[in-house]
Image (cartoon, rainbow, N blue to C red):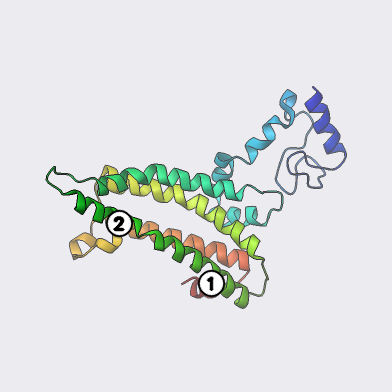
Amino acid sequence: MILQMQGSARVSAGVCADCDAPANGNFCASCGADLRPSSLGFLGQAVAPVRRSFPAVYLKLLRAPVRQTVAFAEDPSYRGHISFALTGIALYALLFVPIVMHTLVPVGGDVHVSESMQTLMKVLSQVGIYFGFALTFALAYAMFRFFASVQRTFAAYFKLYCLALGFIAPIYGAYEFIARGLFGGFGMSSLGALKTEADWMSPSALASIALALLLWAYFVGIHRRFWAMPVWKATALYV
């Protein structure tokens, strides 16, 4: 009862109980929260964090990936982008680690330890990919900021990338787990290992290429919308 009275008082004062943004009417124009006094009942503000939880935000992104990603990035009341990205990466790791372990662990018993260590070193050397990702992120921000008519801050672009990373990481991990772990086919991470025409024309390879193009189009779309530029320009800069 006390929580309900507090929530009603804040609404009557013109402040959203979820994001503290100025609010009038039945719904918040900033976060979409229901501002009607009886909507939450005795739960009061206890339900408010659920609307900004990882599942709730992820479901909103699924409904309109490009539009919702940019909308959350431009929403000053949403500050959970880092935890959203970390949760998405954790889900990716949970799905992808079994595939990595299957690659590292030798199948036969006659494999020397030195060979296993060499394989491990090859995997660990992929840390360079993460360094390259950080460098590419910085260069991408500099290029888009230079060519875009709308000026965005580095923090705003970082927020956009956290949301995008948290969104695609579970999709990437789930697909790799299904394509490689369950069906033993080719995933997006193994496209570089395709050598023959039969490999390229296999169902798993074609599905991996299609999904990779969709994820690429998603990144082009959020950049186009975030930087307010034509599709051709965003595509050229992102490539």
Residue 235 sits above or below residue 98 on the image: below
Left or right: where 116 falls relative to 171? left
Q: Tag 2: Cα neighbours inside 10 Å, few (<14), some, or many (≥20)?
A: few
Which residue carries the number 2 mark?
A: 121
Where on the picture, by quarter, is residue 49? top right
**x then y, percent, for residue 21:** 78, 47
Asked which secondary structure carries label 1, the reply is: helix
Q: Residue at x 78, y 41 (%)?
A: 16
Left or right: where 119 falls relative to 146? left
Residue lying furthest front in this view? Answer: 114
Q: Do the residues labelled 1 and 2 touch (CB within 8 Å)?
A: no
Asked which secondary structure carries label 2, the reply is: helix
* Foreground pick, 121 / 163: 121
Q: Which amino acid does label 2 sit on?
A: Met
Q: What residue type is labelled 1?
A: Leu
- State the quadrant of the N terminus: top right
Q: Residue at x 23, y 57 (%)?
A: 202
Which residue carries the number 1 mark?
A: 139
Residue 203 seen anywhere in this rendered image of the structure: no
Q: Which residue is drawn at 21% across and 65% down?
A: 195
**x then y, percent, for residue 146:** 61, 77
